[in-house]
C-alpha cells in the first residue's frame, strides 16, 4: 500500500513547523537553573545553551535520515524497532510510558502552577498563601502543589474526553509561547545594553557571583548543558514531517538545520534578554519574573507572566497527549500487561481510556516524587535525582545503539547518510551522557536503579510477539497483506 499523505509543505513552512514543535516552556524554567548551576556566570550559560542546541541538531539530522529510510515508521519507538529490534523497542516504549513522559508531564504541571501563582501574587500582593511568595510559596507552597495536581487532572480530562478540544488548545498556545520569548529577547537586550545601569554588560563583567562548591569549571559547564535538554526536548517529533514535505531529501535536512539554528538563537537571546533586565543574583533567586517586571513594568510584565503560564499549560497538554497513549501504543504491538484491555478505544470519544488512566497514575506518582525530592527537598541522599533531566539524558543513551545499528545495517545508503550523520549524532548523544555523568554524579546511580527496577517490571510482561513492523517488508504485496490482517 503506497503512502497516501500528500507532499503539501514547502521549505519555509517546514522550518516554521520545526521551530514551533521544539520551542516550549522549558526555557522559562531552565534559564534560572542554568544561572544557579553556573554560579551566575553568563558566559558559561551561553556556551551551555549553544552546546545543547548543537547536540539537538545532530540528532535531528540522524533521525531525519531514519524518517526518510523508514517512511512507514512514526516515532522513536518504531525507529528503535527498525534498527535494533522488537525487544529494544518494547523497553523504550515502557520507559517512555512510566518514566520519560510522566516525569516531564509532572514538571510541566508544576511549572504551569508556579507561573499562575506568580501572576496572581504579582497582581494582588496581599493574596494569602500558606508560605508567603517572598519565601518561595509560589514554588513549594501547598497551593502550588494543589494547583499542579488540578492542572494535570484537567489536562488528562481534556485529552480523555475530547481529543479535538485538546488539539485546538494545543494550536492556540503555540503562538502564545513565542510572545514573552521574543519580547524579552529583543527588549531585554536593548535595555541591558543602553539602559542607565547597562545591566547586561555589568552582569557579564561580574563573572561568577556565587561560588559553586566542589565543582571545576568543566563540571559546571557539563551540568549546565544537562539543564538545557529539558528546553530542547521535542525535536524528534519534528522529523515526522518527512512524508508530507516536498522534495524531502533536500528540504528536510535543511529545514532541521535552519530551524535548529533559529531555536538556539531564540533561547540564547532570551537568556541574554533576561540577563539585561535584572541583576544576576535576583534572577538566581526569583527567576525571570523580576526581569519581566523590571523591563516592561508591573502591568505588562504580569501579563507576560500570564502568557508564560498559558504557554506551560500548552506544553503540559502536548505531553499529556503522548502520556495518555503510552500503554495503548504498547498494547497495539500485542505487548505488555492486558494488551487487549489497553488497546480498547472508546467509540464515543475515539480515545483509549484504559491507557489514559494508567498514564494519569504514572504522572501523579512522578509529581509526588518531583515535589518531595526536587522542590521541597523533603528527601535527602538515596534515590534523589533530577526527574526533569536524567530521564531525557537516558533517552540520549538509548539512541546510541540505534545509531550504531543503522550504520551496520543500511548498506545501501551513501557514506554521508550511513556513517557521517549517525556518527556525529552518536558523538553528540555520548557527549550529553558524559555531561550527565559528570554533572549529576551520584544521582545517576539512584536513577539507574529506578530505571532498572521499572524496566524489569516491564520485562515481566514481555511476550516477544511480532509487531506490525511494516518497515521490515520490502514486498508491497506482503505489506498489503500485513495491513489487511491488522484490520
Image (tube, grey):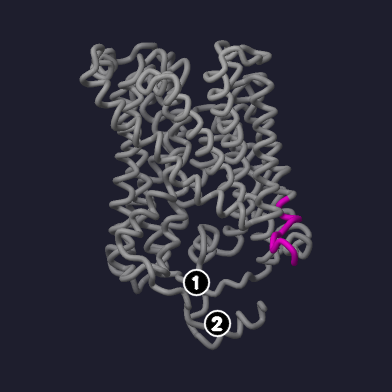
Of all residues, the one furthest to the front in this rendering is 299
Question: Looking at the rendered structure, which numbered label has been put on residue 479?
Answer: 2
User: Of residues 208 and 241, which is closer to you in this image?
Assistant: 241
Q: Residue 194 appears at what percent x and percent y?
A: 21, 19
Check residue 202 in the rendering and tell me which mark sits there, or answer none. none
Secondary structure that dominates the magenta span? loop
Give the percent coordinates (x, y) of residue 422.
Answer: 36, 57
Q: Where residue 242 sits in the image (x, y, percent)?
A: 40, 65
Could you say where residue 150 lies in the image, as x and y percent from the top left? Answer: 69, 35
Q: What range of the chain is rendered magenta?
A: 347-356
Is any part of residue 41 visible from this angle? yes
Residue that protrudes farthest toward the left in the picture: 194
What label does residue 72 carry, if any? 1
Q: Is residue 233 left or right of residue 145?
A: left
Q: Residue at point 50% right, 45% down?
A: 173
Residue at (53% x, 20% y) in the render: 123
Residue 141 on the magenta span: no
Which image quarter: residue 299? top left
| On screen, residue 171 above or below 184 | below
Mark 1 or mark 2: name the one nearer the start of the chain.
1
- Give the Cα distance between marks 1 and 2: 10 Å
Q: Is residue 398 above or below residue 294?
A: below
- Residue at 31% x, 37% y is 50
Amino acid at each position: 500500500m503506497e503512502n497516501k499523505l500528500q507532499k503539501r509543505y514547502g521549505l519555509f513552512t517546514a522550518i516554521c513547523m520545526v521551530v514551533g514543535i521544539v520551542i516550549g516552556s522549558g526555557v522559562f524554567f531552565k534559564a534560572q537553573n542554568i544561572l544557579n548551576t553556573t554560579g551566575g556566570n553568563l558566559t558559561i550559560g551561553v556556551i551551555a545553551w549553544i552546546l545543547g542546541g548543537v547536540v539537538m541538531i545532530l540528532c535531528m539530522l540522524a533521525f531525519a535520515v531514519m524518517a526518510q529510510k523508514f517512511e512507514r515508521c512514526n516515532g522513536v519507538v518504531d525507529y528503535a524497532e527498525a534498527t535494533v529490534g522488537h525487544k529494544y523497542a518494547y523497553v523504550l516504549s515502557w520507559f517512555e510510558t512510566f518514566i520519560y513522559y510522566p516525569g516531564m508531564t509532572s514538571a510541566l504541571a508544576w511549572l504551569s502552577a508556579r507561573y499562575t501563582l506568580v501572576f496572581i501574587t504579582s497582581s494582588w500582593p496581599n493574596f494569602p498563601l500558606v508560605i508567603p511568595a517572598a519565601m518561595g510559596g509560589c514554588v513549594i507552597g501547598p497551593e502550588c502543589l494543589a494547583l499542579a495536581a488540578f492542572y494535570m487532572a484537567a489536562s488528562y480530562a481534556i485529552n480523555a474526553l475530547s481529543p479535538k478540544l485538546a488539539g485546538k488548545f494545543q494550536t492556540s498556545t503555540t503562538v502564545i509561547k513565542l510572545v514573552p520569548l521574543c519580547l524579552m529577547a529583543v527588549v531585554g537586550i536593548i535595555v541591558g545594553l543602553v539602559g542607565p545601569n547597562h545591566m547586561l554588560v555589568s552582569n557579564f563583567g561580574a563573572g561568577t557571583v556565587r561560588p559553586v562548591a566542589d565543582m571545576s569549571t568543566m563540571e559546571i559547564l557539563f551540568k549546565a548543558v544537562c539543564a538545557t535538554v529539558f528546553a530542547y526536548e521535542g525535536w524528534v517529533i519534528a522529523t515526522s514531517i518527512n512524508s508530507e514535505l516536498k522534495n524531502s531529501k533536500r528540504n528536510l535536512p535543511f529545514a532541521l538545520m535552519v530551524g535548529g539554528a533559529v531555536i538556539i538563537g531564540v533561547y540564547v537571546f532570551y537568556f541574554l534578554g533576561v540577563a539585561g533586565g535584572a541583576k544576576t543574583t535576583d534572577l538566581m533567586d526569583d527567576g525571570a519574573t523580576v526581569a519581566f517586571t523590571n523591563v516592561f513594568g508591573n502591568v505588562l510584565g504580569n501579563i507576560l507572566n500570564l502568557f508564560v503560564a498559558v504557554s506551560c499549560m500548552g506544553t503540559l497538554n502536548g505531553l499529556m497527549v503522548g502520556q495518555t497513549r503510552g500503554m495503548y501504543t504498547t498494547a497495539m504491538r500485542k505487548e505488555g500487561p492486558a494488551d487487549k484491555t489497553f488497546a480498547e478505544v472508546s467509540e464515543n470519544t475515539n480515545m483509549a481510556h484504559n491507557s489514559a488512566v494508567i498514564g494519569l497514575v504514572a504522572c501523579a506518582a512522578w509529581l509526588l516524587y518531583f515535589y518531595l525530592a526536587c522542590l521541597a527537598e523533603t528527601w535527602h541522599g538515596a534515590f534523589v535525582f533530577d526527574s526533569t533531566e536524567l530521564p531525557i539524558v537516558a533517552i540520549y543513551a538509548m539512541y546510541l545503539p540505534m545509531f550504531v545499528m543503522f550504520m551496520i545495517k543500511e548498506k545501501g545508503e551513501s557514506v554521508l547518510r550511513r556513517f557521517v550523520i549517525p556518527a556525529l549524532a552518536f558523538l553528540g548523544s555520548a557527549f550529553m551522557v558524559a555531561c550527565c555523568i559528570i554533572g549529576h554524579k551520584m544521582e545517576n546511580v539512584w536513577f539507574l536503579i529506578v530505571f532498572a527496577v521499572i524496566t524489569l517490571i516491564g520485562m515481566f510482561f514481555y511476550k516477544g510477539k511480532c509487531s506490525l513492523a511494516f518497515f521490515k517488508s520490502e514486498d508491497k504485496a506482503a505489506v498489503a497483506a500485513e495491513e489487511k490482517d491488522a484490520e
